[in-house]
Amino acid sequence: MARRLPHKDVVIVGLGWTGSILALELARSGLNVVAIERGPWRDTATDFNIGTAPDELRYAVRHDIFLRPRQETLTMRNNSSQTALPIRRWGSFLPGNGVGGAGSHWNGHTWRFLPDDFRIRSHMIERYGEKIMPEGHQIQDWPMSYDELEPFYDRFEYTLGISGKAGNLKGAVQPGGNPFEGVRTREYPTPPLKQGYAQDLFTKAASGMGLHPFPRPSANISTAYTNPYGCSMAPCTYCGFCERFGCANYSKSSPQTCVLPALVREPNFEARTECEVMKVNLSGDGKTAKGVTYVDANGQEWEQPADLVLLCAYGLFNVRLLLLSGIGKPYDAASGEGVVGRNYAYQTGSGSTAFFENVNFNPFAAAGSLGAAIDDYNSDNFDHGPHGFVGGANITCGYTNGRPIMYHPTPRGTPTWGSAWKKAVRETYQRVVSLGAQGSVMSYRANYLDLDPTYKDQFGRPLMRMTFDFQPNEIKMANWMAERCDEIAKAMGAKTTQVNHLRTPWDVVPYQSTHNTGGAVAGADPKTSVLNRYLQSWDVPNVFVMGACTFPQNAGYNPTGTVGALTYWALDAIQNKYLKSPGALV
């Protein structure tokens, strides 16, 4: 029997980037806010201190700050003819666990989606005709534009102190920046990271090929910075312990460094950690959320009443919570009807590995988002007509790390152990550089999320089932991008190269990307979307959903920058529209 708690104005599920920002801003507005987080409290000084933070075995291998399958997992299959089986060990993607979420362990790549990405369906059909659209697609335009989101991209970047170089400042192309980016109103808050020798070779080679290289925008910041919340950060030391690790230097933007120090000072904010939200509670007619039910670490069930419910968990788990709570019609792939679970997408990864002679790249002097990039082959920045696919990728040359346990680049065909392997590691460690193409994934009728009919969690609730595989459009696009990477690698002066095509069929075991998108998409039509343009549920107006689950499809970038912009976009709607007149905003 659930015990009923005193009423709150706002209950937030999850305390990562989106939950912490919303909690701080709404608490400062005078509302009583409680955030419920499944994992433990995490703080830089105690959890990521300099004595333990660079422990590769603890964090990178044993996944200390990642979700454990016993807490939550899902079942997976490539298509509906297969039987989905539970993920017993997280591999292809690694959800975070605890306060800060994936914002604690990410690399720090912070992109803005391109203007064409927000109206990709309309744009592609206008330029190339309906024939270019892939078979079985469910590609949708976003319900908001780049221009509408630009002030909120800016706000998120200044919260994080992002390091970079503007390429399009108030409509004027800037030397050294990305000429393809959308118009921005001001420069990045901090200058770019210092590039290494490999990035210098990439920049020279790409420029010589008529391409447009620029420093990758980074949440590993280059100089000391204090953000608008009064949170101070220190410059990156290029230690190479970013992804899978918390940052002991206060140099990597995370909720711990950028938001939580201000949030914990708010007297009307409360965090409850190690508490699992079971469902959103609805009124008898199902049109109003009354709060949430959760279970604490002792197994006690609690009911938290609230006027406003904000789902801010990792995107996949927001979708599952909607399904378990009966908010929105579940998607049925057979009929194509329903919306919750629709338009699940992922990220492609391909590229080229280049082997050099007589160089020392020093890969250990690295940062999660250190790199030089090009956008010449992203979105619709190039002519898709001759290639027969939709989508694109950013191509980057960068080192995230040169750590001793997991960084052992060797030529293809090298034995995986023994003296020959040791010899290859010794000869190639300093002389290898990878060029990666991080590509888009469109949405398809056959790729979706739903509740598994067989497997349940410890509380007896159905696990979420993922049905996904890369489609011909993405395979063609990613492999074409790999060839472009190889061209640049050869122009850099590599002795030999090996092309890394997209791994197919999609396999949930080896790590690839934590960039899961879709399942609770925002749109202009309630028949094809879960949320309206303000990330508000069409069916339950006092429920808002954050995160990459709101993307109609994925672009050729990391999603975090756009997740942050959408958070501030929704916050603006909540503060200036919803709270003044609660109800449907569209």
Image (cartoon, rainbow, N blue to C red):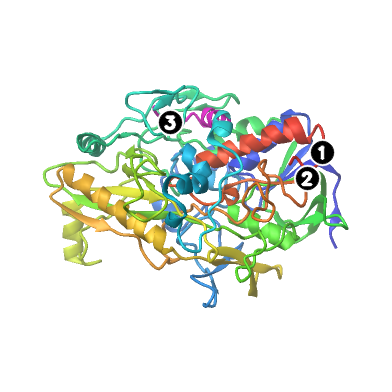
Q: Which quadrant holds residue 238?
A: top left
User: Taking 52 as reference, is 411 above or below it?
Assistant: below
The kind of secondary structure element at disc 2 is loop
The answer to whether one can see residue 223 in this image is no
From the viewer's side, name the closer residue of 104 and 545. Answer: 545
Residue tagged 1: 582
Q: Amino acid at mark 2?
A: Asn
Q: Amino acid at mark 3?
A: Ile
The quarter of the image holding the N terminus is bottom right
Mark 3 and mark 2 in contact? Answer it, CB < 8 Å.
no
Residue 342 position within the rendered picture, expressed as x and y whole percent measured from the top left: 60, 59
Q: Amino acid at mark 1?
A: Pro
Residue tagged 3: 221
Residue at left 25%, top 35%? 203
Left or right: where does residue 25 sit relative to residue 483?
right
Task: Specify the segment rendered in magenta.
Answer: 152-165
From the viewer's side, name the closer residue of 206 and 564. Answer: 206
Residue at left 40%, top 29%? 164
Task: For marks 3 and 1, give the CA distance.
Answer: 39 Å
* Mark 3 closeness class: few <14, some 14–19, many ≥20 residues within 10 Å: many
Mark 2 and mark 1 in contact? Answer it, CB < 8 Å.
yes
Instruction: In the rendered structure, find residue 260 and report the number of the disc placed on it.
Output: none
Residue 93 position within the rendered picture, expressed as x and y whole percent measured from the top left: 48, 57
The kind of secondary structure element at disc 1 is loop
First of labels 2, 1 by sequence position: 2
Left or right: where does residue 412 sit relative to residue 348?
left
* Mark 2 closeness class: few <14, some 14–19, many ≥20 residues within 10 Å: many
